[in-house]
Image (tube, rainbow, N blue to C red):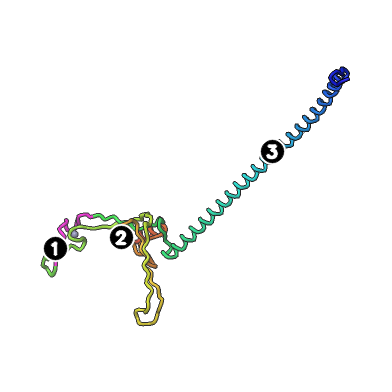
């Protein structure tokens, strides 16, 4: 008897095959479930990882923003400190400041007393004498009207001298004289700042007061 001729073997094989199918199906299901579980776990891990990645990105963004804020604050503080130092050098003024200066308007009218001739006749010891009109200047009355003008400071010139000796000969080494000149345009005349200054004003009220005083002096 040879194996090839064994009918029983083939028959037995068929029976084993159906048994195997069941096992295979069971194994397949088990493997499928396991694979599904593994996939599910992997998916969860991926989501977790993505969430962590998002969190890290978000935190990095927040840290970057905070750094920006800090840097801006530092920059702003430094600028402010520089501005303060500049003001200390320039008697409280700084480039770009809006200050008030005295503007003036001049009007010229013909003198009515001498009808513009600049001469009037006066009686001197019974004699008519021609003299210069006391009411005008060569027949013209010149009147000034003063008013506040708001102007920005274009640039500032600071000129300092450190002295060896005082004028009277006394030793006064190191005395510092500083002359501050404010310029209201690139090429215009400068205005010197003095301790009791009456040319430049920080406020409109101060300037108006000085203008009123000058306008009243004229009248
Ligand atoms: Zn006159």
Q: Residue at x 76, y 32 (%)?
A: 35
- Residue 110 in picture, x, y percent from top left: 19, 55
Residue 198 visible in the shown view:
no
The residue indicated by pointer 2 is 189
Nearest to N terminus: mark 1 or mark 3: 3
**Distance from the alpha carbon under mark 1 to that under mark 3:** 114 Å
Q: Which residue is drawn at 16% across and 60% down?
A: 118
Crowdedness near tag 2: few (<14), some (14–19) or many (≥20) residues, C-alpha within 10 Å? few
118 falls in the magenta region: yes
- Residue 205 in picture, x, y percent from top left: 41, 57
Residue 108 visible in the shown view:
yes
Ligand 1: does it lie within 8 Å of the C-beta at label 3?
A: no
| Relative horizontal placement of residue 96, taking residue 108 as reference (left or right) | right
Ligand 1: does it lie within 8 Å of the C-beta at label 1?
A: no
**Distance from the alpha carbon under mark 2 to that under mark 3:** 75 Å
On screen, 161 above or below 141? below
The front one of 33 and 145 is 33
Number of marks in picture: 3
């Amino acid at each position: 008897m040879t194996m090839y001729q064994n009918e029983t073997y083939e028959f037995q094989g068929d029976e084993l095959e159906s048994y195997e199918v069941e096992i295979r199906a069971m194994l397949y299901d088990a493997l499928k479930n396991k694979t599904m579980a593994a996939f599910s776990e992997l998916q969860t891990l991926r989501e977790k990882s993505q969430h962590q990645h998002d969190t890290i990105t978000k935190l990095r963004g927040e840290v970057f923003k905070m750094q920006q804020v800090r840097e801006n604050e530092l920059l702003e503080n430094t600028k402010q400190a520089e501005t303060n130092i500049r003001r200390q050098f320039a008697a409280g003024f700084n480039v770009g400041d809006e200050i008030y200066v005295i503007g003036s308007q001049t009007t010229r009218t013909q003198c009515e007393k001498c009808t513009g001739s600049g001469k009037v006749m006066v009686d001197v010891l019974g004699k008519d004498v021609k003299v210069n009109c006391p009411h005008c200047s060569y027949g013209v009355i010149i009147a000034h009207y003063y008013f506040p003008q708001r102007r920005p400071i274009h640039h500032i010139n600071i000129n300092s001298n450190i002295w060896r000796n005082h004028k009277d000969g006394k030793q006064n080494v190191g005395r510092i004289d500083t002359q501050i000149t404010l310029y209201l345009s690139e090429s215009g005349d400068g205005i010197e700042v003095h301790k009791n200054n009456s040319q430049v004003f920080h406020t409109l009220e101060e300037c108006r007061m000085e203008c009123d005083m000058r306008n009243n002096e004229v009248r």
